[in-house]
Structure formats: structure tokens, C-alpha cells
Image (cartoon, rainbow, N blue to C red):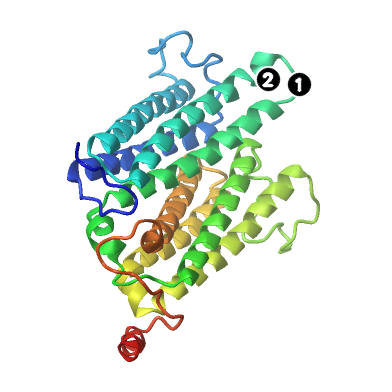
Amino acid sequence: MPNQPNSDQPQEYKPALFWSSLAALIWIILLLYAGGFTTTIRAGMAFLDWPLSNGSINPDGWLENEDMMAEHSHRLLGMVMGLLSISLCVGAFVFRTSKLVKRMGVFLVIMVIVQGLLGGLRVRLDKLNLDIDHNLYAQTFAVAHATLAQVFLCLLVSFVVSNSRSWVQNNAGFDRAPSKNLSTFGIIACLTLVAQLIIGAIMRHNYAGLAITTFPYSDLNGAIIPPAFNFEVAIHFAHRVGAVIVSIAIIAFCIKIWKSELYRKAVGKSAVFLTAALIIQGYLGAQVIWTVRNPHVTTFHMLNGAFTLAICWMITYRSYKFRIQPNTIPATELAPENDSIEDFSQSSASKA
């Protein structure tokens, strides 16, 4: 029986698996938009049952009613995402990929199942089904559902990158191992983004998107801090503060990349896209207020936040290539802090 590759052996590029995973990544964009739009128009309880919709996979009138169409489309897209995840997991084993890719395939299946269950619990534990006077249970599962969607997106991005030609044959674009500082900057930026997305999910599911009705100020008198607080105002203001923190973290990450010739060559274009996504996100956030929470603008704001996290994580994950799955190019030394190729070459020559 032939030896199967593991995390210490070079992986062979499999175009079919790469393009299949990329198709799944495109599909999840549709799923995220459908989920975001459903939340925006408050259609999450268009059907009181789950996993069926009004007792059917094809409920009557769902294409004629906006709320029903939004919620049922989200469920159907999620079902297809589950099938795609299973196919990617099977493909990882059939194509005899590395242990890393196989593990990610298994986790994709586990997470998509958990994600579906969280969505179902959000419906089954809603106050309309429990006949109670609060909706804490449903909102908790709704926020968990929204958060896990972002984690699943990052895992899918990792799966796509790990099966790309650049990762398999060219060490993710790096000529040599980047310093640990690059990965640290990336992790910090990703963590701030995840925290911001959680705050945003809490705000959305508590319908606090217009708790502060002016932007960039917090009231008509030009105050930065709201003059009065309740839960909705506090979570909304926390989201605005979080946007500033995220911006600082991402800008610092991109500066770290642009200052190094090594990093610019490997991930410079991705850093440009990350900066553009950050700018667009700020503009869409302002438009949510200025358009009085237009449903499409609000949904694109959520979706672009997911894009921003995906790009940031993609860059960070690529920086870990030399540590988690070494390839054919030797990487016995980390790049020095000045990241100068000339200085590094001279240092290596002197050691020799």
C-alpha cells in the first residue's frame, strides 16, 4: 500500500480539490448574504418549525412572501453548504492529501452540522414557540450561529489556501520563512475582527443598529460619547469603538507587510485588498445610519465584514506555512526583524 502524505511530507497539488473548495467558498458568500438579509428584515421566524418549513421542504407560497423566501432560501443554501462540506472532506481522503487538510475536511463537516443545529435551536427556542415573555434563548443561539459562521468561513479559507498551487508548490508565495512578528500582527488583527463581528451580531439580533441615529457623532449636538446609555446604545457604541480598534490593528498589519520587500512580494496585493475592504466597511457602516438601515446596505455591511476577516485570516494563515507544513524549500532560519533580503543574504554568507 503506498505511503500517504502527512504533515511532514510534500503535498501534491490537486486541481480538482482546489477548484471544488473555491466553489464552496463562493457558495458561502450566497449563504452569508441570505442569512444576513434574513436577520436584517427580521424574517428569522417566518417558519415556526425546523428543520422543515411549515412541515415541508417546499412550503406553499414561499416564493411570493419576502420573509418566507429569505428564511427558506437561507435554509436551502445551508443544506447545500453541508453537502459541499461533506464532498470536500471525502475529497481530502480520496486524493490522499496531507493530514492537515484531512483534519480540516473533518472539521468542516462537524462545524456545518453544529451550525445547522444552532440555527435550528434559534427557531425552536424562540419565544413564539416557548410562549415566554423574553427571547434570551433564541438570541443567544442566533449570536452563536452568526459567530460560528465566521469561524467556518476562516476554516474554509484555510482549506482553499492549503490546496492551492501557491501553498503546495511555492511555500504560499514566500521565498523564505517570515518572522513570527508578521503572524503575531495578523493574529491580533483577526482577533479584533472576530470580537467586532460578535459585537455586531449582538447588536443586530437586539435590533440596535439605529440605537444611535447620527454618524459620525453620537447625537445632534456633536457629542462623541452618547449622552445617555441603555443596553442598545451601549452595544451600538461598543461596535463603533470596536471599528476604531479594528482599523488600527489592520493598518498596523498592512504597514508591517508594506515595509518589507519579502512580505510585499508574497502578500502585498492581499494587503491592498484588505485595506480596501476596511475602507469599504467604514463607508457601509456610515451608510447604514444615513440610509436609516436600508436592508441591502446593512446586509452588505455584514458581508463585507466577513470578507475583511477572510482576507486578513488568509494572509495570516499563509505566514504560518513554514511552521505548520514545511515544503520543498528549506526554511531553517526565520527572517530577521529588518526583513531585508540583502542583509539576510549577507548574514547567511558570513555564517557559511
Q: Residue at x 39, y 40 (%)?
A: 103
Where is residue 309? Give x, y as percent: 46, 53
Q: Quadrant of the N terminus?
A: top left
Q: Are marks 2 and 1 in contact (CB under 8 Å)?
A: yes
The quadrant in which the C terminus is found is bottom left
Residue 33 against residue 221 in the figure, above or below: above
Q: Is residue 121 above or below residue 149?
A: above
Q: Quadrant of residue 263?
A: bottom left
Residue 30 image position (x, y, % from top left): 37, 37
Residue farthest along the front direction in this orientation: 1
Place of residue 60 in the rendered image (x, y in percent of width and height, measured from the top left)? 41, 10
Viewer-proximal residue among 220 and 201 = 201
Asked if one can make out residue 43 in the rendered structure from this viewpoint, the answer is no
**Residue that carries the numbered disc 1 in the rendered image:** 133
Q: Is residue 201 left or right of residue 336?
A: right
Image point (28%, 57%), residue name: 167
Q: Say what secondary structure mark 2 lies in.
A: helix
Residue at the extreme right: 228
- Residue receiving disc 2: 127
In the image, 115: left or right of 18? right
